[in-house]
Image (cartoon, grey):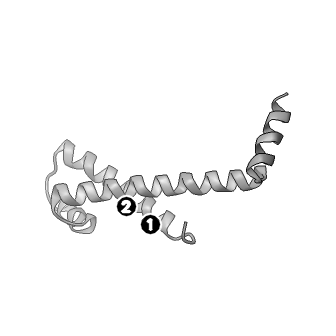
């Protein structure tokens, strides 16, 4: 029953299961890229500098728990965004 419904939907949409999975994967990657970009922008506005500038200062001064937490989140977002941007244009 479910298989018939799926086949009917795919037929109406004129798309295969593989095409649908590819499209969904691309949408998920675009969403993740957008989320990482927004987080990077947030931290750049919050601290008024790029991650590289913040990282240099962070490593050379005594930091608070909040700064360390921000540094980890910001670093993860910058690195994750860089990985996703390497792939062909989504």
Is residue 28 rendered to the left or right of residue 56? right
Expressed as whole percent of the image width and height from the top left, the position of residue 89 reads 54, 71
5 versus 14 height, above or below = above
Q: In which quarter of the image is the N terminus?
A: top right
Judged from this view, the residue extending furthest toward the front is 12
Judged from this view, the residue extending furthest toward the top is 1
Expressed as whole percent of the image width and height from the top left, the position of residue 74 reads 31, 55
Q: Do the residues labelled 1 and 2 touch (CB within 8 Å)?
A: yes
Q: Residue at x 77, y 49 (%)?
A: 17
Name the one closer to the observer, 65 or 2. Answer: 2
Q: Which residue is drawn at 19% across and 65% down?
A: 49
The residue under label 1 is: 82
Is residue 33 rendered to the left or right of residue 1? left
Expressed as whole percent of the image width and height from the top left, the position of residue 47 reads 16, 58
| Callout 1 secondary element | helix
Q: Which residue is drawn at 26% across and 49% down?
A: 70
């Amino acid at each position: 029953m479910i298989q018939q419904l799926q086949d009917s939907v795919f037929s109406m949409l004129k798309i295969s299961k593989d095409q649908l999975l590819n499209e969904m994967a691309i949408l998920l990657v675009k969403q993740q890229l957008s989320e990482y970009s927004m987080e990077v922008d947030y931290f750049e506005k919050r601290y008024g500098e790029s991650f590289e500038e913040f990282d240099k200062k962070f490593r050379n001064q005594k930091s608070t728990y909040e700064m360390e937490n921000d540094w980890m989140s910001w670093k993860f977002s910058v690195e994750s965004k860089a990985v996703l941007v390497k792939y062909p244009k989504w």
